[in-house]
């Protein structure tokens, strides 16, 4: 292992730390001023010798301060953990140390076991970051060690030399477009364009023109001829996201393109040949949409040549740590700041979160932490409120959820909703819990007691949010996502359910 570098002009401090670290089998190298350290770093870079695993530096030394040294080290070695030693009366410097990217500060006079423990933490963090960087170099497109993700990677590999149509299924935010881009990048069409369109995000009246283009004068405002997405993707790949939301009449036009490779621009009379590979994605159950008459069966079979199911993040919990570190580094690059690190305790807490928004939600959380976490090391207390509100007793949570009887399966779950049963029109007082399961009121009491015993001060807000979320999600599942109908069944207004969906982050 690389040595721990100790920088202090006080010989007694160096001696004490050296002996304590050697007892822990941690090699050391000591310096008396910043000039010696900078020279040693340059030599290590030039001769490819071992640099430090962790650097521990005093703030006030002749010939240069520890904060100046921190700035210079972070400019060249941003991943190196630096611990700044400072006197209790020098807290302003401690704040500056954190702002400069220090791993932690060690107040003088320090407790020796605590100092060793802190250095050991920094060593662990340094080694973990090294492994993380190696993994990112090996898999820059997508990250995933979970078996379900490895299956996806293998499928991408098998399809690498194919032009076959692919249907990607998975919940919203699970990374379906990343899979589509990977399929394109590793296909014979990699040198061609990759064009993506979200069919649910474009109004029905404009979607036809977006896909197939239009001729001049085809409709009011069509001043010039415009090429659609199919022509823009010529020789490459067209990714049709949320294909389940495509209007029925446009499905017929898409079917023709997939069948014979020709289409007409809006207002056009000459067919256009399309040399495009189509990859489609949806979070919906297309088989159920076909049964309900909302999706053409012949189009479904055209798209469903090869189906790839992308797992939800809750199904690949072992990937949360690697993804978290990746997104923290990515957010830091985007914001132009020093990447933050996350403690094991905070990662463990994050892993208990269900991530209804999947990988996209984790990415947003990491962006929030990069901006809002006060220190360079993210602790459990720094996590956002929705993560901290995770149930402390999962059994109590299950008991606290409303239980339904006389139920029928919901075939097309919404994003983040497991297939579950919802109540037929039985009044609340008629709903009974199955044998062996306590009533939801009892479960709520148990959950409240657990949160209160844990010293939480946001019990009302945490439980209210979960109660409202469960009600709305169950109503939306019952109405297959129709908000107005769900609001009517709940006895609330249309604006109220829309506002609550946004406030609770259900989408």
Image (tube, rainbow, N blue to C red):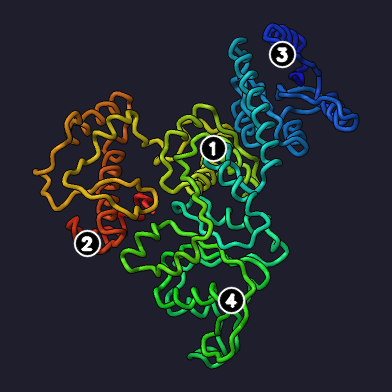
Decide: few, some or many residues near mark 3? Use Cα within 10 Å; few <14, some 14-19, many ≥20. some
Task: Pick whichever, 113 or 333, lies toward us.
Answer: 333
| Residue 86 in the image: above or below residue 17 | below
Is residue 7 visible to us here? no
Task: Tell us which disc is closer to us: 4 or 3.
Answer: 4
Looking at this view, is 200 or 21 the one in front? 200
Task: Please tell me whether residue 323 is drawn above or below residue 268 in the rendered image.
Answer: above
Q: Are marks 1 and 4 in contact (CB under 8 Å)?
A: no
Quarter-of-image position of residue 196:
bottom right
Q: Nearer the viewer, residue 57 or 488?
A: 488
- Mark 4 highlights which residue? 261
Mark with earlier residue (4, 2): 4
Residue tagged 1? 147
- The earlier-in-sequence mark between 1 and 4 is 1
Tag 1 secondary structure: helix
Q: CA distance from mark 1 to mark 4?
A: 37 Å
User: Of discs 1 and 4, which sits in the foreground?
Assistant: 4
Viewport quadrant of the C terminus: bottom left
Query: Which residue in the protein does label 2 denote?
Result: 493
Mark 1 vs 2, N-terminal side: 1
Bin the neighbour count of mark 4 within 10 Å (Cα to Cα): few under 14, some 14-19, many 20 and up.
Answer: some
Residue 209 position in % (x across, y down): 51, 80
Task: Describe the element under mark 2 as helix, strand or loop.
Answer: loop
């Amino acid at each position: 292992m690389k040595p721990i570098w100790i920088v202090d002009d006080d010989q007694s401090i160096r001696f004490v730390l050296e002996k304590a670290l050697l007892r822990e089998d941690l090699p050391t190298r000591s310096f008396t001023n910043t000039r010696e350290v900078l020279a040693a770093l340059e030599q290590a870079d030039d001769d490819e010798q071992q640099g430090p695993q962790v650097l521990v530096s005093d703030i006030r030394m002749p010939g240069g301060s520890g904060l100046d040294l921190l700035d210079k080290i972070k400019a060249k070695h941003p991943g190196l953990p630096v611990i700044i030693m400072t006197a209790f009366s020098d807290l302003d410097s401690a704040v500056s140390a954190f702002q400069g990217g220090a791993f932690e500060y060690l107040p003088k006079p320090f407790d020796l076991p605590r100092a060793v423990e802190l250095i050991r933490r920094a060593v662990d963090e340094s080694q973990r970051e090294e492994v993380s960087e190696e993994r990112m170099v090996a898999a820059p497109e997508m990250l995933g060690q979970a078996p379900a993700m490895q299956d996806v990677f293998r499928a991408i590999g098998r399809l690498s030399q194919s032009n076959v149509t692919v249907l990607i299924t998975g919940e919203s935010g699970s990374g379906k477009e990343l899979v589509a881009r990977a399929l394109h990048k590793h296909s014979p069409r990699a040198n061609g364009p990759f064009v993506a369109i979200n069919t649910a995000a474009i109004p029905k009246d404009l979607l036809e023109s977006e896909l197939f283009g239009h001729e001049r004068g085809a409709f009011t405002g069509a001043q010039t001829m415009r090429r659609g997405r199919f022509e823009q993707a010529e020789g490459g790949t067209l990714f049709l996201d949320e294909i389940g939301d495509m209007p029925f009449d446009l499905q017929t036009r898409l079917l023709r393109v997939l069948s014979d490779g020709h289409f007409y621009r809006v207002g056009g009379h000459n067919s256009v040949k399309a040399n495009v590979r189509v990859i489609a994605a949806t979070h919906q159950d297309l088989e159920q949409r076909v049964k309900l008459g909302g999706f053409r069966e012949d189009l479904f079979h055209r798209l469903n040549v090869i189906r790839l199911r992308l797992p939800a993040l809750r199904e690949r919990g072992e990937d949360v740590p690697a993804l978290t570190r990746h997104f923290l580094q990515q957010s830091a690059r985007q914001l132009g700041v020093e990447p933050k690190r996350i403690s094991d305790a905070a990662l463990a807490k994050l892993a208990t979160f269900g991530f209804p928004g999947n990988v996209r939600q984790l990415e947003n959380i990491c962006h929030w932490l990069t901006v809002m976490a006060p220190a360079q090391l993210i602790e459990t207390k720094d996590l956002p409120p929705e993560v901290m509100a995770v149930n402390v007793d999962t059994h109590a949570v299950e008991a606290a959820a409303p239980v339904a009887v006389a139920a029928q399966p919901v075939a097309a779950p919404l994003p983040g909703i497991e297939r579950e049963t919802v109540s037929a029109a039985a009044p609340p007082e008629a709903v009974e819990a199955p044998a062996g399961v306590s009533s939801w009121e009892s479960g709520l009491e148990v959950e409240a007691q657990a949160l209160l015993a844990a010293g939480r001060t946001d019990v009302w807000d945490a439980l209210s949010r979960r109660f409202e979320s469960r009600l709305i999600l169950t109503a939306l599942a019952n109405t297959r996502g129709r908000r107005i109908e769900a609001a009517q069944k709940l006895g609330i207004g249309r604006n109220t359910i829309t506002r609550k969906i946004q406030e609770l982050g259900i989408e």
